[in-house]
Image (cartoon, rainbow, N blue to C red):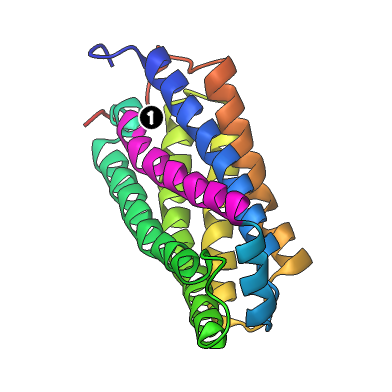
């Protein structure tokens, strides 16, 4: 990897990961705070009375979407010398996830368009609330589909990190386990009614530890170079 500094690529990747983590935690947590399960009218009132925060949620999702697409490039450049084909596959799955996330987030924008106007009350308000609730439900479903793809991406990245010796092998294994966890948890969310809560939290713990650990390592330590790869470079 002599065309670009691996340390610069590592720090850029870590910075984008940090943006993704911060925006992701904020956007998902804040959005959940607006939704009252099974009560479209209460959800609509929450959105109307919290337009400023909901606008910030939309901005958070937008920044997250851009960062998710952007990070695929330095991550590919960092890992392509380990296995070019697998790194390209990881990049493709990341971009596919970003595309699916973009589709999902349009539902949140549509919900805001339906409910964001404080004058949208009276006749037709109930219909707007129901439609907005349906848009938010479609976001949840599309997001889960996207997370299945993201899990596959994370699995590829974990394998590459484990083989590269750029970071401790334990961290690569943790990222790999996190990818599997995303796939399993998201499929359960799509297929099993009521899945979530403590079971989902327990499943996603390796993913959270792997993502946070990798972000911190890339930002603080960068990568260790100069070690032989277990496989010929592509």
Label 1: state its secondary structure. Answer: loop
**In the orientation shown, which residue stands out farthest toward the right?**
198
Majority secondary structure in the magenta region: helix
| In this picture, residue 71 sits left or right of residue 23 | left
Among the 4 quarters of the image, the one containing residue 215: top right
Residue drawn 31% across the image and 39% down it: 87
Among the 4 quarters of the image, the one containing residue 198: bottom right
What's drawn in magenta, residue-wise?
51-75
Task: Count up the numbered dots.
Answer: 1
Residue drawn 47% across the image and 23% down it: 166
Residue occupied by mark 1: 230
84, 110: nearer the viewer:
110
Tell me the quadrant of the picture where the N terminus can be found. Answer: top left
Eyeballing the image, is 77 above or below 105?
A: above
Residue drawn 55% across the image and 46% down it: 56
Q: Is residue 177 visible?
A: no
Q: Is residue 13 visible?
A: yes
Q: Residue 19, percent across and down?
A: 52, 34
């Amino acid at each position: 990897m002599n065309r670009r500094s691996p340390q610069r690529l590592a720090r850029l990747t870590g910075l984008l990961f940090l943006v993704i983590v911060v925006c992701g935690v904020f956007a998902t947590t804040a959005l959940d705070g607006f939704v009252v399960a099974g009560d479209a009218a209460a959800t609509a009132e929450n959105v109307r009375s919290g337009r400023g925060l909901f606008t910030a949620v939309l901005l958070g999702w937008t920044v997250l979407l851009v960062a998710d697409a952007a990070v695929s490039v330095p991550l590919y450049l960092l890992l392509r010398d380990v296995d070019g084909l697998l790194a390209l596959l990881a990049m493709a799955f990341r971009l596919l996830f970003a595309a699916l996330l973009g589709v999902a987030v349009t539902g949140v924008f549509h919900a805001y368009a339906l409910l964001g106007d404080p004058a949208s009350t009276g006749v037709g308000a109930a219909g707007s609330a129901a439609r907005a609730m349906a848009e938010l439900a479609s976001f949840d479903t599309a997001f889960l589909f996207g997370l299945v793809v993201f899990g596959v991406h994370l699995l590829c990245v974990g394998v590459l990190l484990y083989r590269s010796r750029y970071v401790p092998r334990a961290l690569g294994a943790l990222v790999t386990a996190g990818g599997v966890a995303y796939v399993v948890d998201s499929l359960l969310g799509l297929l099993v009614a009521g899945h979530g809560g403590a079971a989902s939290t327990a499943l996603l713990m390796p993913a959270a530890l792997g993502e946070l650990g990798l972000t911190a390592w890339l930002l603080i330590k960068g990568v260790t170079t100069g070690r032989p790869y277990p496989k010929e470079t592509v």
